[in-house]
Image (spheres, rainbow, N blue to C red):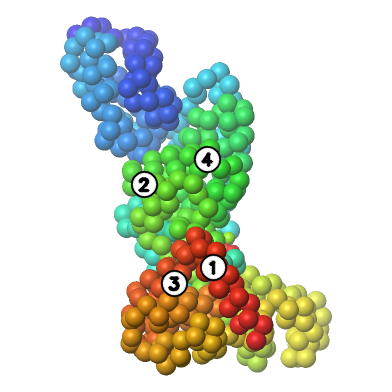
């Protein structure tokens, strides 16, 4: 066995790196090999130190034989490889450096930090109801066994319905259960901004280090990936996403639209996004809105009479964030004045909110009647069992509108249409959604119907 001192150990490894880069690719080398440390050469085993379990399993699963072959060639004898995770004081190894500019990486790492979690966004503070039960259950499952159940978990909804809340609730649980886990919460917008900075300053390895050495990656508002920088950010996102999913690290994504409606260019990314579980959050019904108000008021230390809660919940239907805003305004009034809170006073306080929501709810009966007149298909036939083309299309349009304009669940909509299964309803909804993006006539039809119904 050739004598290998610690200096020559470094030398051997330094020589190995560019050769390995040729075989495993520069990106993998920068991300996974450059920040490793040769620890020992004992017997015929080369011991390599890596920053975390993630790097260890990645290298063991994918590159063990390539590294062994390279070392065997350099040391001129059969070499085995042992990979050890090095515990550093702050649990993090030095940031990898791949170019002189990257020696500023520690500052870069600070810059690439993620936002701390909001302590209020916990599962305990989240009111569960039909509108969010599935997404909530999936989020809890993922939080309790990250990387082991659904990957990725994709949560989508309109604004203000609890996506960020659930994402961060997952972060809280993982951090509680596994204090050593690296949990990154980041909005896609910040991801893109950090990426641009990293590219500009030649600090990509620090950026990649931040996002690829994580156990749970929570990415909020992913629609920004598509809209800001186009292919570059999409590609970087895609690689990070793949790296994490392939090593069973948990990825959770929030979006304002389902994957199929995201304006992304890469179809591989779109289908990867759909590979785990896709869950949506819908507008809460009035009882749920009352429950949310009650919970939020309690958190503010204020008890409000039931009639006031009912009034606010009925008045504000648009989203939970607006509901919460109104409540905080009422709470502020209570704490700033000594006056007794009356319903009339509440009416005044939240007067500006009334325009933010439609006061009249659209019903499924109205929808079906409108579609019936518009598309010349009798209501009873539309609601009946027939499946010929003349009735299937108007029925699908009505189902789409019901899902868009009412709070009804898939099951409730199915029941209304002759007891159809919820998957049939979902199929109809998706079919119309798809056509909307490809067929202008459908877009006009849907927009006309929506406009007419909302004006009723
Ligand atoms: P989104 O990310 O979907 O726009 P957020 O997660 O920011 O929405 O939610 C907006 C506000 O509404 C937050 O303050 C959140 O705590 C609250 N919220 C939403 N849904 C619920 C719920 N089911 N229970 C309690 N609070 C909720
Ligand atoms: Mg949000």
Q: Nearer the viewer, mark 1 or mark 3?
A: 1
Q: Which residue is mark 1?
A: 441
The mark that comes first in sequence, 2 or 3, is: 2
Q: CA distance from mark 2 to mark 3?
A: 29 Å
Q: Residues within 10 Å of mark 4 (few under 14, many from 20)?
A: some
What is the tally of numbered marks visible in this picture?
A: 4
Q: Which residue is mark 3?
A: 429
Label 3 element class: helix
Q: Which residue is mark 2?
A: 245
- Is residue 252 rendered to the left or right of residue 361? left
Label 4 element class: helix
The mark that comes first in sequence, 1 or 4, is: 4
- State whether residue 149 is above or below residue 264: below
Q: CA distance from mark 4 to mark 2?
A: 20 Å
The mark that comes first in sequence, 1 or 3, is: 3
On-image quarter of the N terminus: top left
- State whether residue 325 is above or below residue 247: below
Q: CA distance from mark 1 to mark 4?
A: 30 Å
What label does residue 83 carry, if any?
Answer: none
Label 2 element class: helix
Residue 290 appears in the rendering: no
Q: Residues within 10 Å of mark 2 (few under 14, many from 20)?
A: some
Identity of the residue drawn at 40% across and 80% down: 390
User: Residue 153 appears in which quarter of the rendering?
Assistant: bottom left
Q: CA distance from mark 1 to mark 2?
A: 39 Å
Q: CA distance from mark 1 to mark 3?
A: 17 Å
The mark that comes first in sequence, 4 or 2, is: 4
């Amino acid at each position: 066995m050739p004598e290998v001192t610690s200096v020559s150990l470094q030398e051997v490894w330094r020589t190995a790196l560019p050769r390995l880069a040729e075989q495993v690719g520069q990106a993998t080398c920068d991300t996974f090999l450059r920040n490793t440390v040769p620890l020992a050469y004992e017997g015929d085993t080369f011991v390599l130190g890596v920053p975390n379990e993630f790097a260890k399993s990645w290298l063991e699963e994918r590159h063990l034989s390539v590294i062994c072959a390279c070392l065997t060639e350099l040391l001129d004898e059969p070499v085995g490889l042992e990979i050890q995770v090095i515990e550093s004081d702050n649990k993090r190894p030095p940031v990898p450096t791949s170019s002189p500019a990257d020696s500023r990486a520690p500052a870069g790492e600070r810059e690439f930090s993620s936002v701390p979690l909001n302590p209020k966004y916990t599962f305990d503070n989240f009111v569960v109801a039909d509108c969010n039960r599935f997404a909530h259950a999936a989020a809890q499952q993922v939080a309790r066994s990250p990387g082991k159940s659904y990957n990725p978990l994709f949560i989508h909804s309109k604004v203000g319905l609890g996506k960020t809340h659930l994402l961060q609730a997952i972060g809280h649980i993982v951090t509680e259960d596994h204090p050593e886990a690296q949990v990154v919460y980041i909005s896609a917008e910040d991801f893109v901004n950090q990426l641009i900075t990293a590219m500009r300053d030649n600090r990509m390895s620090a950026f990649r280090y931040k996002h690829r050495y994580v156990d749970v990656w929570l990415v909020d508002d992913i629609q920004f990936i598509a809209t800001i920088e186009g292919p570059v950010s999409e590609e970087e996102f895609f690689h990070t996403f793949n790296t994490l999913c392939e090593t069973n690290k948990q990825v959770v994504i929030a979006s304002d639209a389902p994957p199929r409606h995201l304006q992304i260019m890469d179809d591989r990314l779109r289908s990867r996004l759909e590979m785990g579980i896709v869950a949506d959050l819908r507008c809460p019904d009035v009882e749920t809105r009352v429950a949310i108000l009650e919970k939020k008021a309690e958190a503010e230390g204020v008890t409000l009479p039931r009639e006031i809660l009912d009034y606010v919940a009925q008045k504000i239907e648009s989203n939970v964030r607006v509901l919460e805003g109104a409540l905080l305004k009422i709470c502020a009034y209570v704490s700033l004045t000594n006056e007794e809170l009356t319903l009339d006073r509440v009416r005044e306080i939240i007067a500006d909110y009334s325009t933010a929501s439609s006061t009249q709810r659209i019903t499924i009966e109205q929808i079906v009647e409108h579609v019936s007149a518009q598309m010349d298909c009798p209501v009873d036939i539309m609601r009946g069992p027939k499946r010929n083309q003349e009735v299937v299309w108007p029925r699908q349009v009505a189902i789409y509108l019901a899902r868009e304009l009412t709070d009804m669940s898939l099951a409730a909509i199915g029941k209304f249409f002759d007891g159809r299964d919820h998957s049939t309803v979902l199929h109809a909804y998706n079919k119309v959604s798809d056509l909307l993006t490809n067929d202008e006539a459908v877009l006009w039809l849907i927009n006309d119907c929506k406009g007419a119904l909302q004006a009723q």
